[in-house]
Amino acid sequence: MSSFSGLIKRIGSLKQLRLIVVFFLISLFVWLSSKMSEVHTAKVDIYFDYSDETFETYRVHEPPEAIEFVISGTGLRLLFARLFTPTVYLSMTNIQNDGNRFYYSKPALISAVETHYRNVLRVNQLKLDRLDAPFFAASVKKIPVRLHEDFMLADGYAWSSELNFTPDSLYVSGSAEKVDSLEYAFVIMPTNKEFTTSLDEKLSLTQDLQVNYKWSDTQVHATQKISRYTQIELRLPIEVLDPVESIDVSVIPAFAQVSLRVPVQQARQIDPSQFILGCRLPFDTISEFLEVDFEKIPDNIVVNEITPSQVRYFIN
């Protein structure tokens, strides 16, 4: 019986202890809530980064430095601000230029910090008068577009027009040292396919150009006609071009065999009268042979070979 009474007493003591602990925790919570709801002031280190940049500027990437602000706010929000070092992003719309450097003014920095904290924390003090931004006036240069590698055409096909880019040039900006070293804006094909139809595609700048430079655009529209070709042979007379009236010149041989690639749809309309094959007298040098080449040839025809490519000449 006595052991049962002791057990009852111990249970009663445990209940009292639990009640004391509960009341203590409730009191602590009320006290903390009261303290956290009060406005406090603390020093907070803040890092700045930049959300955008203009085409007329370029950025030198430097490791960010923390800037100390004295901030006031309720205890809980201030606690989080101190525990998690924030990064505040500055917009180029608020940047200023004194003629030598781009910078952010003290009011712009304070406004950016308070906006970051949604105006629930306030900046009480900032010793810094301005923050020099790692931006500099860019050098802008117009660069002609070029194809990085030749296109692959299926057998029996060839280009039947010039390759055109729209636009044919792009603007690049950056430091003068980097921009001046560029000669061409190279674009690449998205695939390695063999073309059998005319080119009409958007082509992108090479990856290294996109990564290392800032461009007015990273794509151009490329067009070029492709035709199916057939090979034909013609025997054409070799004319002496721009002859001198007082000089009678003969060439040997008088005819040349030419091998041509002609669009299939154009092949049936080919006539020798459409061509002029000739050579010119070398008035400035003494030579035994004259070069043979086309003076006149229809569009879209590719010359494979002229035999012979040189002829002897005689003045009669």
Image (cartoon, rainbow, N blue to C red):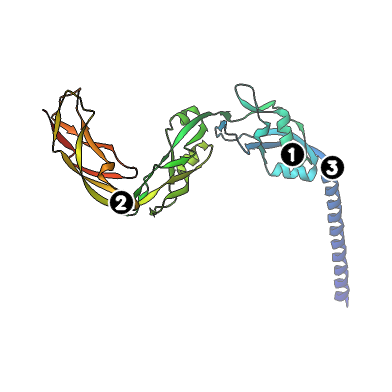
Q: Which residue is mark 1?
A: 115
What's the residue at 72%, 42% (across, down)? 81
Number of marks in picture: 3
Label 3: how many Cα within 10 Å (few below 14, some 14–19, many 20+): few
Instruction: Give x and y (percent) for residue 51.
Output: 63, 39
Residue flagged by tag 1: what amino acid is it?
Thr
Q: Nearer the viewer, residue 112 or 184?
A: 184
Q: Along the polypeptide, which appears first: circle 3 or circle 2?
A: 3
Instruction: Give x and y (percent) for residue 82.
Output: 71, 41
Q: Along the polypeptide, which appears first: circle 1 or circle 3?
A: 3
* Circles 3 and 2 in contact, beta carbons < 8 Å: no
Q: Secondary structure at mark 3?
A: loop
* Circles 1 and 3 in contact, beta carbons < 8 Å: no
Task: Tell me if residue 10 comes above or below residue 118 in the rendering.
Answer: below
Label 2: how many Cα within 10 Å (few below 14, some 14–19, many 20+): some
Q: Which residue is mark 3?
A: 38
**In the rendered image, which quarter is residue 15 located in?**
bottom right
Q: Quick check: can you spot residue 126?
A: no
* Circles 2 and 1 in contact, beta carbons < 8 Å: no
**In the rendered image, which quarter is residue 244 located in?**
top left
Q: Nearer the viewer, residue 238 or 188?
A: 238
Instruction: Give x and y (percent) for residue 236.
Output: 21, 42
The Cα atoms of the two marked residues, 2 and 1, are separated by: 73 Å
What's the residue at 53%, 40% (across, down)? 217
Q: Nearer the viewer, residue 285 or 242?
A: 242
Q: Which residue is mark 2?
A: 267
**In the rendered image, which quarter is residue 274 located in?**
top left
Left or right placement of residue 131 versus residue 167 in this view: right
The Cα atoms of the two marked residues, 1 and 3, are separated by: 21 Å
